[in-house]
Amino acid sequence: MNDLWHQIFNFSDYGALLGLVKNSLIAGAILGLIGGLVGTFVIMRDLPFAVHGISELSFAGASGALLLGTNVMAGSLVGSVLAACAIGALGIRARDRNSIIGVLMPFGLGLGVLFLALYKGRAANKFGLLTGQIVAVDTVQLSWLTGTAAVILIALVILWRPLTFASLDPEVASARGVPVRALAPLFTIVLGLAVAISIQIVGALLVLTLLCTPAAAAMRVTASPVKAPLLSTLFATVSIVGGTLLALGSSIPISPYVTTISFAIYLVCRCIGAVRTRSTWGRREARPYASQGDARAEAPVARLAGKG
Amino acid sequence: MISLRDAALSYGERILWRDLTLDVAPGEFLAVLGPNGSGKTSLLRALLGQTPLSAGTLTIDGRPPRRGSALVGYIPQQKTLAPNTPLRSRDLVRLGIDGHRWGIGWGGPAVRRRVEELLADVGAAHYADVPVGLLSGGEQQRVRVAQALATDPRILLCDEPLLSLDLNHQRAITELLDRRRRTRDTTVVFVTHEINPILAMVDRVLYLAGGRFSVGTVSEVMTSQTLSELYGTTVDVIRTGGRIVVAGAVDGSGTPHHNGAVKEAAT
């Protein structure tokens, strides 16, 4: 039991190890920021399945690059953007989109497995692409990651308001002149970039832990369009940086630490959200104005009136 | 305010309506009625600048319609929003003010004050901070009215805004619209399949059916004779207790019922 514990959590020589993963920690912080912000729109637009689909093609691209001995990050970017373009071009409607993703996903994964099977290099490289790795971030990769993140951030800053409008209220957004249809493929490409840089650290199978869970958790506790992305970013950063720090001394991949923290945050937020909905937001129904209200608002008032 | 000259709209071979010449005055309340597929919503889309006419001209305030024009406010049907939609009532209204602009947009005190005003005007101030997903249908539509008025439009386009609301809320929403057009001379174009909730405030009716139309006051259009001519079959319009019931009208495909089935076009 104790052995197992030490395998999972091992903090000996921690200071020395910390120096080795400096790049990973910086990368983690950047990914937390990007994951939290992009994830907000992933939830708003109901795209978690697309995230998963893109990540498998991104994995194919990355493993292809590994096999050819070129830049893995560039490979995964190519895979991601191709997948995003395919989804953006073919899947305008939600139903089409999901079936296209369902078709692309196994193809990408299969391709990736083929490339990895042909690859004769270090086994850890192979496994890392799927389940994440911690010491793989060298300075070249970090600059790729930072550059891509900057592109994503700039795109998000420009698109933020109309994209929010189009995601949550498409009909009125379109009436107000927002190019609702053009924004969909545009965001899918931004999402593709975010997926490509995420799989370098958390792995293709677990990208959702960065691009879905933190935002879903944030939206359980706040409906403010300012607080939701901020909290989402905080949750994503805590998950990935915290996961990296915990994983440091052990021989286990980083992903279980990240996913566990991320999931725990989600559970806590769900509980808080459930309590809040019932108490704070529910209480307004007793206001006198609600007596003009409809069934949902009327029920408690009518009951009170009956007793009085 | 709105001017249509020999306007027609068709999808391929199918003509929704044509030769439509109509001027809608400022402050006028125009109800657009007709069976499903008769081109009611398409008319709204044309007014919003989303669909071009197939023939004829359309001007709004003397100019061709433009997408996203601040002159036009739009109120959609009430629909169920996901309970965890990350928007509060105030945010929905705010999107109506500047949601179409690029950038993040931090708002600022002027925007915040405007949102408060708009919400107070429709009696929605006390649920300004409630997530829209937790609002009831009637509350949601109140917020929708505030959102549509965000740009202080001269025309309000309403696409079945009362659908799935109970009678109290139907009254509350129509009173908001009526007050607005009386105090601010805002033209209201109200697409509906039920005329009764708005009977008291309608100035004119545009009835679309089977590629044809009829325009006039309620007493001119909502008669057995007019609707029978429009549908090309016998339609009975019955006035009872301040309500209008249309019997023997058509189904959604635009073809008359021959089996004597009665459909209330106006509940």
Image: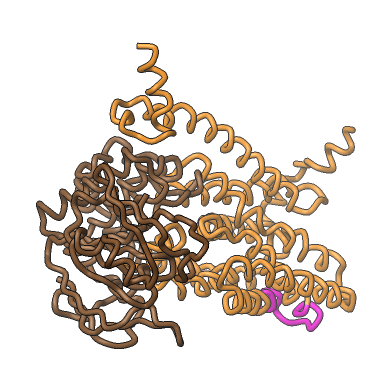
Chain colours: A orange, B brown
Give the position of the N terminus of chain A as an image quadrant. Answer: top right
Give the residue drawn at x 61%, y 50%: A213
B34 to B23, vertically: above or below: above
- In the displayed structure, does residue A256 sit left or right of residue B168? right
Q: Does A65 appear in magenta?
A: yes
Residue in the picture at 41% in, 40% down: B136
Percent coordinates x, y for residue B117 in the rendering: 19, 46
Q: Is residue A58 above or below residue B204?
A: below
The one of A12 and A113 positioned closer to us in this rendering = A113
For the magenta stretch, what is the residue range? Answer: A64-76
Snapshot quadrant of residue B125:
top left
Q: For residue A144, which quarter of the picture?
A: bottom right
Majority SS type along the magenta span: helix
Image position, residue B99 (x, y; %): 33, 61
Seen at 58% across and 37% down, the residue is A270
Label count reads 0
Nearest the viewer among A140 and A51 is A51
Q: Split into 4 quadrants, where in the image is the C terminus of chain A?
A: top left
- In percent of width and height, residue A54 lies at 67, 69
Looking at the image, residue A134 sits to the left or right of residue A294; the answer is right
Q: Position of residue A70 (x, y in %)?
A: 73, 82
**Quadrant in the rendering for residue B73:** bottom left
The residue drawn where x is 77% and y is 59% is: A131
Q: Is residue A52 magenta?
A: no
Q: Is residue A154 visible?
A: no
Determine whether, in the image, residue A81 is placed left or right of residue B246: right
Pick the front one: B197 or B188: B197
**Residue furthest out toward the top:** A308
Q: Does residue A19 show up? A: yes
